[in-house]
Image (spheres, rainbow, N blue to C red):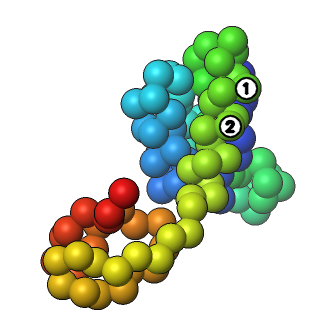
């Protein structure tokens, strides 16, 4: 196992670990409950961490994590309802139509 990164909170750590695992980089969240002792230990030691099981995929997992942390910003006009959609979204928030390619 190799430590990939710290996450700012447990929700993001779990989301990122699940995305990495789904992409073929088995990952786990360590220190999930360490926030309970924040104040008794340094705050940066209480943050959840993402670890990958196979260190050989470390570079590729690091690149994928960077993409997850900084999703692309897009703006598109929905073909279904004409609404403008901003952000890293793949579907229209108003009608659910997929983003055009």
In this rendering, position of residue 68 left or right of residue 82: right
Residue 71 visible in image: yes
Q: Residue at x 61, y 24 (%)?
A: 52
Return the residue at label 1: 59
Q: Are marks 1 and 2 in contact (CB under 8 Å)?
A: yes
In this rendering, position of residue 100 left or right of residue 55: left
Residue 34 visible in image: no
Q: Residues within 10 Å of mark 2 (few under 14, many from 20)?
A: few
Total number of numbered discs in the rendering: 2
Q: Nearer the viewer, residue 45 or 11?
A: 11
Tell me the SS state at disc 2: helix
Q: Nearer the viewer, residue 70 or 21?
A: 70
Residue 86 image offset from top left, x and y in percent: 45, 79
Residue 88 image offset from top left, x and y in percent: 47, 66
Q: Nearer the viewer, residue 32 or 93?
A: 93
Q: Residue at x 19, y 70 (%)?
A: 96
Q: Nearer the viewer, residue 25 or 100?
A: 100
**Residue 81 occupies which quadrant of the picture?**
bottom left
**Residue 40 occupies which quadrant of the picture?**
bottom right
Residue 63: image tag: 2
Q: Residue at x 58, y 17 (%)?
A: 53
Q: Residue at x 62, y 42 (%)?
A: 65
- Calculate the distance from the C-alpha at mark 1 to the C-alpha at mark 2: 6 Å
Tell me the SS state at disc 1: helix
Residue 45 image offset from top left, x and y in percent: 77, 48
Q: Residue 4, relative to residue 91: is it above or below?
A: above
Q: Residues within 10 Å of mark 1 (few under 14, many from 20)?
A: few
Q: Residue 38, relative to residue 54: is it above or below?
A: below
In this rendering, position of residue 41 left or right of residue 82: right
Q: Residue 33, relative to residue 97: is it above or below?
A: above
């Amino acid at each position: 196992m190799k430590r990939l990164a710290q996450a700012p909170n447990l929700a993001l750590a779990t989301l990122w670990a699940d995305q990495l695992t789904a992409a073929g980089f088995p990952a786990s969240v360590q220190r999930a409950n360490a926030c309970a002792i924040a104040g008794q230990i340094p705050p940066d030691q209480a943050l959840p961490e993402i670890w990958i099981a196979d260190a050989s995929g470390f570079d590729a997992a690091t690149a994928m994590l960077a993409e997850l942390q900084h999703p692309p910003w897009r703006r598109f006009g929905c073909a279904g309802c004409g609404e403008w959609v901003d952000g890293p979204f793949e579907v229209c928030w108003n009608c659910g139509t997929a983003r055009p390619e």
